[in-house]
Image (spheres, rainbow, N blue to C red):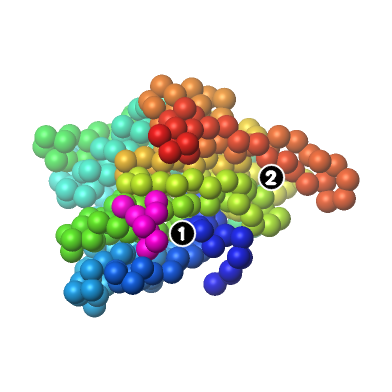
Amino acid sequence: MWHDPAWEDLDMRMFFRSRLLVLPCALLLVSSCRTADTTLSYSGKTMGTTYNVVAIASADTPSVKLGKAIEASLRRVNRHLSNWDPKSEVSRFNAAKVTTPVAVSDMMLKVVAAANAVHRDSLGHFDVTLAPLIALWGFGRRTPEQPFPSVEKIEAARSQVGQAAKLSLDESARTLTKLDPGVTVNLAAIAKGYGVDEVAATLRQFGIENYMVEIGGDLVTRGRNARGRKWRIGIEKPDPAGRSIQLTVDIGALGMATSGDYRNYREKDGIRYSHILSVKTGRPITHKTASVTVLADSAMLADAWATALLALGMSDGMKIAKKHNLAALFIYRAGDQGGAGNKTTFATSMSPRFADIKAGK
């Protein structure tokens, strides 16, 4: 645990990682307990990363039973949505090289339907069929040391990508159909957020109304923290050379996620290639937006939209955020200070909805 006295009022220091790959989670800082309540804390591993749960509960809450229920909910999510489990529902769907409708679970139906909505509203910049390009650029199961792809290989991979053109979800029939037998679905940029929401639902089943749930940097809060205040979250400055907070925000019953390009990347000839890929070019993004934080009604939507808006970049992403009344914070590279270390300076831009939440409206 890394403790900084200056951050004692923060409930979570958000040290975000990739939204397309599963990497380590944020660090947790829990405030002191009120004597009238019991603060229950749970942590463990899931989805290739870690989870942390803080629940402000009554003294008679069955803590052991609750911990088992949390783990059971996470196992259910992995059983359906994990691309790293070859026996999961999504992995079995990917392995079936068929173009006939496949019956899907309620969980898969809900997540793919949400992914389709974000895909549509982001003008295609959120896409769950990107796996061929992710692997090609060395951000999947392959190693980052693999050669950079040729134009021909990029175009070949792009031919296997396209959520709207390659997949058909029939919500009434509860089926998902491949329109191309080779297409695959990767839910890494939305499944962790959904997992957060499922754990939160489990807490509410136990009568808990004040909590924070975090998986790999995605989180949701509700009610108040142990000191009776709104949960305060610190958003990291997107500087790969160190860790510090750009700003803080107090949130109530909201999901939160950040996508950044500054922890997971490759370099060649002095050029940084982000793991965030543009579905339009098949190549890593090149704009100056370093991270995007989104607040939404669910962690699932925050997770997906953070990825989509980072892929879009601040200029186009802010237009989308305003159009759909999204609470989004863009942090972008504003220039170099020069001198020793030639440090990059960062600036922020908030959508109107994010600014309202930041101001407590």
The C terminus - image quarter: top left
- As drawn, the residue found furthest toward the front would be 35
Q: Is residue 202 left or right of residue 331?
A: left
Q: Which mark is residue 11?
A: 1
In the rendered image, residue 287 lying in the magenta stretch gets the answer: no
User: In the depicted view, which residue is nearer to us: 166 or 322?
Assistant: 322
The secondary structure making up most of the magenta span is loop
Q: Toward which corner of the image does residue 209 lie, by quadrant?
A: bottom left
Q: Residue at x 31, y 52 (%)?
A: 223
Q: Secondary structure at mark 2?
A: strand
Q: Which mark is residue 272?
A: 2
Callout 2, which amino acid? Arg
- As drawn, the residue found furthest toward the bottom would be 64
Q: Secondary structure at mark 1?
A: loop
- As drawn, the residue found furthest toward the right would be 339
Callout 1, which amino acid? Asp
In this rendering, does residue 247 appear at all? yes
Q: Is residue 303 left or right of residue 205?
A: right
Is tag 2's residue or tag 1's residue first in the polypeptide sequence?
A: 1
Q: Residues within 10 Å of mark 1 (few under 14, many from 20)?
A: many
Where residue 46 sits in the image (x, y, percent)?
37, 65
In the rendered image, residue 227 lying in the magenta stretch gets the answer: yes
User: In the depicted view, which residue is nearer to us: 205 or 334?
Assistant: 205
User: In the depicted view, which residue is nearer to us: 335 or 81?
Assistant: 335
Where residue 154 sits in the image (x, y, percent)?
55, 38
The N terminus - image quarter: bottom right
Question: In the rendered structure, which segment of residues is drawn in magenta?
Answer: 223-230
